[in-house]
Amino acid sequence: MTNPITILRSLLFYVAYYIGTALLVIFATPVSKIGERYVSPMIAGWARFHHLCVIYLLGIRVEVRGELPRDGVLIAMKHESFFEALELPYLFSRPVAFAKAELLRIPIWGPLGRANGLIPVEREQGARTLRTMLQAVKSYVGKGRVIVIFPEGTRVPHGTEPPLLAGFAAVYKTLKIPVVPIAVNSGPLYHRRWKKRGTIVFSVCDPIEPGLPRAEIEARVHKAINHLNE
């Protein structure tokens, strides 16, 4: 049976977070018409608001082990819940990330996401969407922005280790920049209706050099992003 305090914490979080998100969308939409450069600070503020809600309403601590890179790398991150996706603008300055195309079709929110650097992924279109993704992400290389990919392609339950999708190797080969794997263990606490207290860890692994064969880079990244399962 779920602890009543856990339920109360979660309800307070949902109310505060969704009201805050609605206010962001209301204010950010006219601002985005002025210029895309004004959107990123608002998205960063929204991520900071979510982070504070997680800490003070849900009672979840967030720990970063290792040093987060600032630019010039491809981040390959474990994906167990929405938490790490929402936390990206808090962890990094103006991150460029791949996202499900459906999210970018949401009215109002979609254009804001694109303006902030989200790259849509059309899962059903195979090679065609991969080429479009690669063209889009190449334009950000050398601009001082971190590029983030969830190489498993979708959220997975904690403790599971599915193979990486082929798109990761294609992005790695195209960009020719180091990869920094990051393991996350958010699933047991955040990926549930009634979110639990505890500590979510981002474990930053050593950079992996560009130019490795596909089998080697996939094996090394797969091992690195799953090491918190142990």
Image (cartoon, helix red, strand yellow):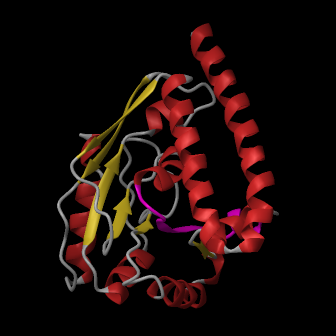
Tell me, yes or no, if residue 161 can be seen here: yes
Q: 9 above or below 184?
A: above
Q: 64 above or below 104?
A: above
- In the rendered structure, the answer to whether residue 24 lies left or right of residue 191 reads right
Of residues 28 and 3, the one drawn nearer to the viewer in this rendering: 28
Question: What is the quadrant of residue 113 in the picture?
Answer: bottom right
Residue at point 23%, 57% (across, down) = 223
Residue at point 24%, 48% (across, down) = 227
For the N terminus, give its image quadrant: top right
Tell me, yes or no, if residue 106 can be seen here: no
Question: What is the quadrant of residue 20 in the picture?
Answer: top right
Q: 169 above or below 71?
A: below
- In the rendered structure, the answer to whether residue 210 lies left or right of residue 148 reads left
Q: Which residues are magenta?
A: 92-105
Q: Residue furthest front?
A: 34
Residue 8 rendering spot, x and y as whole percentages: 65, 15
Residue at point 28%, 62% (across, down) = 69
Residue 103 belongs to magenta span = yes
Q: How many marks?
A: 0
Residue 149 belongs to magenta span = no
Of residues 128 and 62, the one drawn nearer to the viewer in this rendering: 62
Residue at point 57%, 58% (across, down) = 41
Of residues 82 and 55, the one drawn nearer to the viewer in this rendering: 55
Residue 38 rendering spot, x and y as whole percentages: 63, 66
Residue 90 rendering spot, x and y as whole percentages: 47, 50
Q: 74 above or below 58?
A: below
For the C terminus, give its image quadrant: top left
- In the rendered structure, the answer to whether residue 71 lies left or right of residue 188 reads left
Of residues 117 and 133, the one drawn nearer to the viewer in this rendering: 117
Residue 117 rendering spot, x and y as whole percentages: 56, 72
